[in-house]
Image (tube, grey):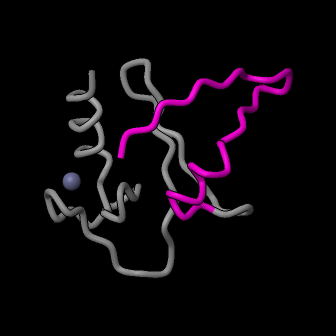
Amino acid sequence: MTLDYTRKIDDLGRIVIPDNLRQNLGWQIGDTLSLYCIDGAIALCMVKVNRKQECVYCKNTAVKVRINEKDVCVTCLEKIMEMMP
Ligand SMILES: [Zn+2]
């Protein structure tokens, strides 16, 4: 799924994540997100808690983010971000 949204940062440094995008990602009000800055881009990811996690790519157990229902470690996240245009 690739969606393209443009949002302005408000006076307090906030942006609004569109409701339909949050619904597609299963994000709800009050969920905790992590922000990773990689080469000038930001990855915004749901923080997962209370279950054993393992990176789907390298099996690292230091999983930090969840992308498309898959647990991913920071090292693999950086590799994914490098492949993005
Ligand atoms: Zn990994």
Describe residue 27's horizontal placement relative to residue 72 as left or right.
right
Describe residue 77's horizontal placement relative to residue 58 as left or right.
right
Q: Is residue 24 magenta?
A: yes
Q: Position of residue 37 (x, y in %)?
A: 46, 30
Describe residue 19's horizontal placement relative to residue 77 as left or right.
right
As drawn, 58 above or below 75: below
The magenta span reads 1-27
Residue at (75, 32) in percent of width and height: 14
Describe residue 80's horizontal placement relative to residue 4 as left or right.
left
Residue at (66, 25) in percent of width and height: 7
- Quarter of the image with the C terminus is top left
Residue at (21, 62) in percent of width and height: 60
Q: Residue furthest right?
A: 11
Determine which quarter of the picture holds residue 69.
Answer: bottom left
Q: Residue furthest bottom?
A: 51
Q: Where is residue 48 in the image (x, y as percent from the top left)?
A: 48, 67
Quick one: 29 or 57, which is closer to the camera? Answer: 29
Q: Position of residue 30 (x, y in %)?
A: 73, 63
Quick one: 48 or 24, which is closer to the camera? Answer: 24
As drawn, 40 above or below 24: above
Q: Does the magenta stretch include residue 56?
A: no
Q: Where is residue 42 in the image (x, y as percent from the top left)?
A: 48, 31
Quick one: 45 or 54, which is closer to the camera? Answer: 45
As drawn, 63 above or below 15: below
Total numbered labels: 0
Residue at (25, 44) in percent of width and height: 75
As drawn, 11 above or below 50: above
Q: Residue furthest left?
A: 58
